[in-house]
Image (cartoon, grey):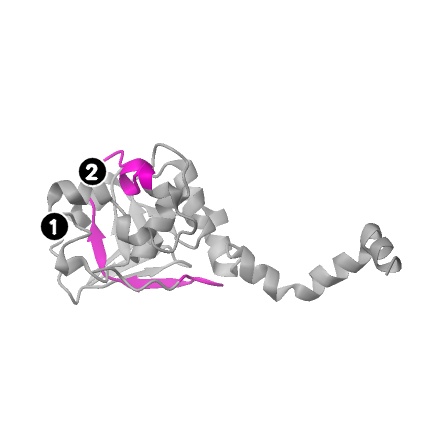
């Protein structure tokens, strides 16, 4: 069972969803989405193959296969998550499975940037706090509420301060992370710039 995919767009201020705990340091992009799945023409169906090899080894016991985690959208990880190759397929696969936000001890830099580019905020917490969260026995009705403006996460009576780069936070709050929407909102400026280009004017004069 996979989560229904609906891509994020525009400004992002909050994320509310069930958490899914993935324990382990240095989980690389080849584990997130094995290389044989990189031949795809589009990213649309990558969600079904996320952690394919790990899930096969665990035969239904992987966190992404457990019934209680279906519908989860907030991934809790440990240190150096997303290390290895720079393949953008890794965050794309997570997004298409249903992950909307990741909270971890640390992230590989390129993986982090690829997540930001598709609207998946990545927050950091200390090793101790991440361990405490991962030990929570989440139930079907348990929800995390992440406030991007305040950089906080609420869970029941618990409220923790998260860390995120200021530049990334500004992009989410303004919607600038979403290049497609930004372009569509500024079609008049694009048209104006096209009309100002001398070679465009020249081509038009030939017709």
Is 35 inside the magenta-drawn segment? yes
Given residues 15 and 71, the one toward you in this image is 71
Q: Which quadrant of the view contains residue 108? A: top left
Kindly identify the residue that appears in the image at 86 percent across and 61 percent down: 207
Q: Position of residue 24 (x, y in %)?
A: 20, 38
> Would you name the residue on which mark 1 appears?
60
> Would you name the residue on which mark 2 appears?
24
Q: Position of residue 168 (x, y in %)?
A: 47, 49
Q: Quadrant of the N terminus?
A: bottom left
Answer with mark 2 or mark 1, whichever residue precedes in sequence. Answer: 2
Q: Please say if 145 is above or below 56.
A: below
Is 12 inside the magenta-drawn segment? yes
Q: Is residue 206 left or right of residue 146?
A: right
Secondary structure state at the residue bearing disc 2: loop
Given residues 68 and 206, the one toward you in this image is 206
Q: Which quadrant of the view contains residue 7? A: bottom left
Q: What segment is highlighted magenta in the picture?
A: 7-36
Q: Please say if 43 is above or below 108.
A: below
Kindly identify the residue that appears in the image at 27 percent across and 33 percent down: 26
Q: Which quadrant of the view contains residue 3? A: bottom left
Q: Please say if 25 is above or below 144.
A: above
Secondary structure state at the residue bearing disc 1: loop
Given residues 94 and 178, the one toward you in this image is 94
User: Is residue 72 visible in this depiction of the protein?
Assistant: yes
Q: Position of residue 13 (x, y in %)?
A: 42, 63
Q: Position of residue 43 (x, y in %)?
A: 40, 52
Q: Is residue 73 left or right of residue 57?
A: right
């Amino acid at each position: 069972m996979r989560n229904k995919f609906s891509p994020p767009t525009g400004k992002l201020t909050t994320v509310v969803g069930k958490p899914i705990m993935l324990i382990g340091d240095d989980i690389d992009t080849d584990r997130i989405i094995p290389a044989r799945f990189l031949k795809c023409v589009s990213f649309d169906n990558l969600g079904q193959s996320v952690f394919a090899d790990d899930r096969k080894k665990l035969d239904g016991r992987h966190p992404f296969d457990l019934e209680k985690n279906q519908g989860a959208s907030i991934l809790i990880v440990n240190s150096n998550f997303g290390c290895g190759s720079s393949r953008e397929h890794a965050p794309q696969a997570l997004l298409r499975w249903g992950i909307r936000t990741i909270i971890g001890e640390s992230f590989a830099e390129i993986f982090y940037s690829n997540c930001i580019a598709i609207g998946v905020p990545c927050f950091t917490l200390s090793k101790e706090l991440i361990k405490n969260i991962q030990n929570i026995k989440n139930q079907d009705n348990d929800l995390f509420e992440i406030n991007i403006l305040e950089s906080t996460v609420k869970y029941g009576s618990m409220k923790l301060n998260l860390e995120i780069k200021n530049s990334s936070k500004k992009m989410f709050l303004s919607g600038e992370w979403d290049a497609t929407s930004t372009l569509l909102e500024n079609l008049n400026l694009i048209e104006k710039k096209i009309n100002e280009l001398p070679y465009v004017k020249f081509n038009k004069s030939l017709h």
